[in-house]
Image (cartoon, rainbow, N blue to C red):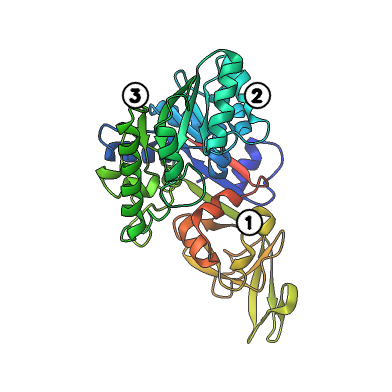
Amino acid sequence: MISFSELADASPGTPSAGLLEIDLDAVRANYRLLRGLVGNAVCGGVVKADSYGLGADRVVPALAREGCRHFFVAHADEALALLPCLPNGGILYVLNGLTGDAVPEIARRLAEGAPVVPVLNSLGHVIVWREAAARLGRVLPAVLQIDTGMSRLGLAPVDVAAVAGDGAAFAGLDIRFVMSHLACADEPLHPASAAQLGAFNAARDVLARHGAFAGARWSLANSSGIFLGAGYHFDLVRPGAALYGLNPQPGGDNPMRAVVRLRARIIQTRSIPAGSHVGYGYTFESTGAARVATLSVGYADGWPRSLSGRGAAWLGDHRLPILGRVSMDSVVVDVSHVPAGLAVADAPVELIGGHQTVDDVAEAAGTIGYEILTSLGRRYRRVYIGG
């Protein structure tokens, strides 16, 4: 564990909000575990949103060392920014497809040899990409997404049937694989997953009857989908959250290694008498004398305001309940039960770590671990371990 003083000695300045440690070796271990569950299927990695806020420029090379070659982002600009990090043979897939000015930019980069492949999410996308291939006089790669019930992205079943019988629909396009996305895979007993699997297989049958995409591969499972069994794995799985330590099986034991550790520090401590108020809105009033500590973290650092009066930090094995509202740059916790020599200025307190996971924080905040990770701001001093 790195201390604030050690970090200050190693680099100029001291961390403002706190320390965010990101264990790249844990990311690699999580990838290995997931890859081992999917048999002959290829295991990709979702690195959108800057690898869920943890630094895609560091995560992509770490995954590449484990043999990952299929990386998924949401937007074209994310893909282009990651090109310098991509291993030989690596491919970046743009999940949101051909939005905005992505068509000319992706086409230009492909012409230059950049492995950036759009996901076609509508008949409009198919037409636009087909026309781009005709203009360039070359075959352009693509992924086709079909909607199996989520009503978010992808061709509807009627559209699948329409293009399946149209031999010219994908002229000039190399469909690398056909994908869909599971909506309820984190609830193993939810009937939606089986229904989506049935819809996915039905679409495969429709396309097969017309001889479409004979060489294409198929992809359905996200992180939680991997744990639904081999019937969901197909040719390629696309884990994201599980790579970063979030539990792909909520309610059960987490098989993934923790990736992040987050600490803030105490700015000051004080003793307050009974009847004192804490924080904005005076939402907390002490019923007796207490000692409180102000921490250097707030909602500007991704520590949710919804944790006001319900979340906690930890100092050693002592739980420090949050008093009053989380403000932009600070939060007040109760240290009445902590030995005075421990709760002192500059002492590090744990926000995410051995006592509470990302998922624990998310539950207390009334959200999901994805939102906690992607909200962690840039004001933390980041330390990468291993990789």
Q: Foreground: 360 or 287?
A: 360
Task: Please give the label number shown on residue 215.
Answer: 3
Q: Position of residue 238 (x, y in %)?
A: 41, 39
Mark sitting on residue 104: 2
Camera-nearest label, 3 or 1 = 3
Whether tag 1 and tag 2 are in contact, CB under 8 A, the answer is no
User: In the rendered view, would you say 270 is above or below 49?
Assistant: below
Residue at mark 3 to residue at mark 2: CA–CA distance: 27 Å
Q: Is residue 309 above or below residue 187?
A: below
> Taking 261 as reference, is 218 left or right?
left
**Three-letter amino acid code at the position of disc 3:** Gly
Is 196 positioned to the left or the right of 118 in the image? left
Amino acid type of the residue that numbered disc 2 sits on in the rendered structure: Pro
Q: What amino acid type is highlighted by mark number 1?
A: Arg
Q: Which mark is residue 360?
A: none
Mark 1 sits on what residue?
A: 265
Which one is nearer the viewer's eye here, 69 or 31?
69
